[in-house]
Image (spheres, rainbow, N blue to C red):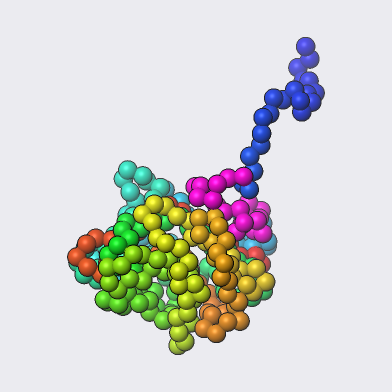
Amino acid sequence: MPRYQKLSVDELNVNKIITNKALGANDYGLTPEIWESFPLMNMLVDPTIGITAGDDFASVAVTGFPYAIAGANGTAVSLTTAPSILLMTAPGTDNDECFVTYNNALSGLITLNATKNWAFEARVKVSQITTAQGVFVGLAGPSSGVGADFMTDNTMALKVIDLLGFQIIAATDVAAIWQTIHAKTSGARVAVDSTAATAAVSFVKLGMKCISGTVSFFYNGALLDTQVKTTAENFPLDVVVNPVFATKCGSGAANTLQVDWWRAAQLR
């Protein structure tokens, strides 16, 4: 028999090739419908196409670059039982909080403009869905105040700064609901969809993308009904932002937010 032999497809005994499109919505990986317009691998070798960054938290060093941690009594560590997960904890005293910002809360990563398409997605898990709390997962401007009291004591309201993403706001003990929101410094917070999804204590994927000036939101890989234009009032247009993760407890019970991974990208 020759050392090299040409084989036909029928001889290879390939049963099925599973593409990203065939994967379930709540799988571990990136949502194809978000990232189909962003050639992430090409970006890594050719920055002229665009920029991309992300983290699976195989190691966590939130006391220095590339993350800043803020908030009363909050901690952020790598889980010892699952070293690729970031565990953010608001320890349990009323209004304890933990806010983590990429790029050390200094320089930004994505510019929220209408001409350069961008995307963001993260896989996260909250620890409870019944008592008072505040949670934010999304993008926010590092120069506009992601720091202590990013969320207001007792009300859990976010500080009105440049931001865009997913929020749970529960000033009292109520069932947690994910909202899609945006806000602008010196403007106001706007709920794009105040009942985007019912929160759960399992891992979920929260994502968004901006294509030609329209921002779409995704929950567990599924496109949500309500979008927002970058021309909308109080949209933080042309602001430079970073990935931000935040949790705050509204009663004497500890809150945690686990972050499995996140990814962001923007075309040039």
Q: Residue at x 36, y 71 (%)?
A: 169
- Above or below, 202 relative to 153: above
Is 146 on the left or on the right of 35, as rendered?
left
Q: Which residues are magenta?
A: 22-43
Residue 84, given in percent of the width and then of the height, sits at 40, 47
Q: Name the residue located 36 percent from the left edge and 54 percent from the top edge.
A: 201
Give the vertical position of 120 relative to 10 (above or below): below
Residue 119 occupies quadrant: bottom right
Q: Residue at left 79%, top 26%? A: 8
Depth check: 208 or 108 in front? 208
Q: Position of residue 10 (x, y in %)?
A: 76, 25
Front residue (pair 28, 241): 28
Q: Is residue 30 magenta-colored?
A: yes
Q: Residue furthest bottom?
A: 186
Residue 176 placement: quadrant: bottom left
Residue 233 position within the rendered picture, expressed as x and y whole percent measured from the top left: 55, 85
Q: Is residue 124 above or below residue 157?
A: above
How many labels, in total? Answer: 0
Residue 95, picture quadrant: bottom left
Looking at the picture, how far across and down is residue 46, in whole percent?
66, 56
The reply to whether residue 61 is in sight is no
Say which residue appears at 51% left-offset and 74% top-offset. 192
Quadrant assignment for the N terminus? top right
Q: Is residue 78 magenta?
A: no
Given residues 94 and 185, the one toward you in this image is 94
From where the camera sits, is residue 226 visible? yes
Q: Is residue 81 shown left or right of residue 184?
A: left
Please state which of residues 82 and 92 is positioned toward the viewer in this rendering.
92
Quadrant where the image shows the C terminus: bottom right
Horizontal relation, residue 27 to residue 167: left or right: right
